[in-house]
Amino acid sequence: MKEFFKKVWHFIKTSTLLKYAVVAVFAVVFIGFVDENSVWSHFRNMQTISDLQEEINAYNAQHEQNQARIKELDKDPKAIEKIARERYFMKEDDEDIFILSDDQPDEAAQPTDHETAE
């Protein structure tokens, strides 16, 4: 096995065309896969840029919706009252609020056979 490598090394050393071919293959492998600025890294960075661009577009759309909502709140005082009632359960003095929920009751909160509910 050692002699085989010696023969191959000697053949590469004596052949000028093969020297250039070996260097070219080594350079392509190094630039394509090993280097920090490799083609592989370039593709990964392009994918990251694409994902971040989609995220930027989503945030811009949300920003536009929020700006429209702010303009609506500035123009209409009833809109502020609506938000206060819906989100923060605020009420007027002569009103009662009933909150209906479709959530399943928490099993840990229900008493078991050996516990008594007061």
Image (cartoon, rainbow, N blue to C red):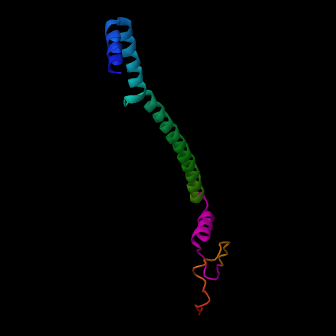
**Residue at the spot x=61%, y=71% of the render?**
85
Nearer to me, 66 or 58: 58
The residue lying toward the viewer, choosing from 113 and 2, is 2
83 magenta-colored: yes
The x and y percentages for residue 70 are 56, 56
User: In x, y percent, where is residue 76?
Assistant: 61, 61
Looking at the image, is 53 positioned above or below residue 71? Answer: above
Quadrant position of the N terminus in the picture: top left
Which quarter of the picture shows residue 89?
bottom right
From where the camera sits, is residue 20 visible?
A: yes
Image quarter hosting the C terminus: bottom right
User: Over which residues does the magenta segment extend?
Assistant: 75-97
Q: Position of residue 83 (x, y in %)?
A: 60, 66
Q: x and y percent of residue 35 in the render?
A: 37, 28
Tell me the residue at 57%/71% (across/down). Answer: 88
In the rendered view, tell whether residue 3 sits above or below residue 86: above
Rendering quarter of residue 103: bottom right
Out of 76 and 110, give the one closest to the viewer.
Answer: 110
Is 18 covered by the magenta stretch?
A: no
Residue at figure coordinates x 62%, y 89% from the top left: 113
Q: How many marks?
A: 0
